[in-house]
Every structure is written in C-alpha cells, then in structure tokens.
Image (cartoon, grey):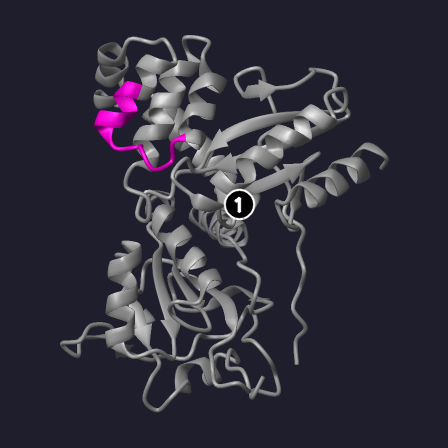
Amino acid sequence: MSDPNGLIQPGRTAPGFTLPATPDGDLLGPEQFRGRPVVLAFYPADWSPVCGDQMSLYQSAAPVFAQYQAVVLGVSVDSIWSHRAFAESRGIEFPLLADFEPKGEVARRYGAYMPNGEAARALVVLDPAGKVTWSYLSPPDVNPGADGIFDALDQLAADRKVMAG
Amino acid sequence: MSTPLQVTARLRDPVTTDDHIRGPADAAVTIVEYGDFQCQFCGAAYPNLHELLRQRADTVRLVYRYFPIANVHPYAERAAETAEAAGVRGRFWEMHDWLYEHQDQLDPVHLSLGVEQVGLPPDELNAEVENRAHADRVRRDFVGGIRSGVNGTPTLFVNGIRHDGGYDLPDLLTAADAAANA
C-alpha cells in the first residue's frame, strides 16, 4: 500500500474523481450517480484470469445489482483500449474506468494502490450521498465474490427504511 | 496498513428437497456445487466429482445448483434450463451428465440431440425453454449462489463452507474426508 492509512474506511466521504470510461474520452465518476449506491471495484489488471472471473461475475449479477439500483464501476490502471477489448471479450457492459494517467491516482486516493503498480483488489461501496459505507481489501489472487457487496447494500436499504420511518 | 480480512464464505440457502441431489440422503458430507454447463473448469471437475462419489459412496452426496455466467458462456443459460426441464421429468442427472460429457455440443441443434439421447422429447423441452418456463428456478439458484459467496465456477461448498482448494480428485477426497471427520 502506498497509502499508509490503507484502504479507505466506512464513514469517510469518498474522494471525488472522474476517469475516462470510453475511447471517446467520456469521463465517469461516482458523483454522477448521487442518489444511488455506487460500488467501486478496484482490480489489478484486465486479462488476468482471476480478474476476468470477478468482473464477469459482476456482469452476470447485473440483475441483482439493478434490484438495489446500484451502479458498478470497475477501476484498474489499464488503458481505455485494454478495457474496451477486455469488456468485449467478457460481455461486460458496466463501465471499466481507466486509472491510467496519472497512473493509479484514484486508486492511491482510496488507499487501493499496490507497490507493483497495479490497483489492489478492493471493494468500496458508497451510499447514495457519496459516503463510504463498506470497504474490503482482498488478497490480489482471491476473487472476493459479491456477497459482501450485497450485504452492504442490504444494510444501506435497511438504514434508509429506518430513516424514512 | 490494513491486512486483508479473510472471510470464509458460507452457504446461505440450505439444501432442500427441491434440490438436485445425488448420493445417500444421510451422507455425512454434502457437497453443493454451483456450476455452469459451458464452463471448462466445471467440465474438468465433473469426472473428479463422479469419482469422489464412487469412492465415498456411503459418506458423500452431491447437490447441483445452476450458476450460468451468461455473458461469457452464451449456451450456459439454455443448458441450465434444459437440465431443469429434464429435472421436472425425473431425468436431471442424466441430462447433467450428458451436458458435461458434450461441452463442445451445447448449441441448440446438438442440445436437442442430447435431449433425445437422454430419452426425452426434444420439441416439448425446447418449447419450455423457449417460454423461459424454468428461468426462475435457474435465477433463484444463481442469486442464492452469489449471496453465498460464489466467486466463479465451479464453486463448491463442503458441509456449507466454501471450498477454496482445487478440484483434482486428491483435493476433493481430502476436503470430503476432513469434513467427514470434523
């Protein structure tokens, strides 16, 4: 970890950012999705087999994310061109953001950057107001699945119900 | 510096009589597999699971649940729904075995031949699959899996705890024997 404090922790306001999401230069970031939960899935690299499984898995779980109106954003230090080819080969339709230049800047701000120059395999769930509600750092070679994300989204939904009631 | 938090994923949907189960009802070890019929790793695990059940016929039973990763495997969902259509006719495992033994023949034309080989009426099953008659069941398995920490295919739960080891026969025997003696 280059950030001595490690992965961003619940309760903190998520650092704002936008990153290229398409080869056309379209920029995307969590602030564009205020009012909805946002899942930031940092991952080391396109194409490595574990990553492929993790991002493919999140795509296959898209209907479940939709039930929570949650937005999933994948983030790695790969270029938009790599992202595009990777997304096409795995049928990934949610945005993969290129934390490419300055390299890893967003990952660093979230405490999710590794000394080897890749993003860590880290999950960060933001509430609809943009505050971190859950974060999880997985060993780079372990696909963390999605159960922790959905537990966090359940908790968010329950909290909102209490506030509304 | 935060250390990676290791969480052991656990099966959240208990095994019920609605499940597809192979092996003795009173087995000491229940292995729940979340699988995708078009996944090569599931295909590689298939003969090993078969052999495990043969060698531990008194102690191990296998439960199969659907986990099609449709964006990567275009035939996986249809294969799962076809297996379920066979399942409602009491032929789940015959269809399951055919699918894993013919993973390069899952396109609709060959799949129909497979249904016929299993001894079921292809047109009838095709119609059900076209109407998505079994889509809910497949989806239910999938959602239960993702909530339980399925992180790819195959994912096995051995007596409710995710098996993070390999799928070779020795790995499976070791995991099953450890669970039996726990």
Q: Is any part of residue B12 visible from this angle?
A: no
Question: What span is in magenta?
Answer: B102-113
Residue A154 picture location, percent across and down: 49, 47
Question: Could you tell me which quadrant the C terminus of chain B lies in?
Answer: top right
Total labels drawn: 1
Q: Nearer the viewer, residue A161 or B85?
A: B85
Question: Against A119, is B157 above or below?
Answer: above
The kind of residue on which mark 1 rests is Val
Front-most of B83 and A159? B83
Q: Quick check: B119 above or below A112?
A: above
Residue that extends furthest to the right in the rendered view of this protein: B181
Asked which quadrant contains residue A129, the reply is bottom left
Q: How crowded is mark 1: few (under 14 residues within 10 Å), some or many (20 or more)?
A: many
Horizontal arrangement in the rendering, residue B83 relative to residue B162 (left or right): left
Asked if the magenta segment contains residue A13, the reply would be no
Could you tell me which residue is drawn at 53 percent across and 45 percent down?
B150
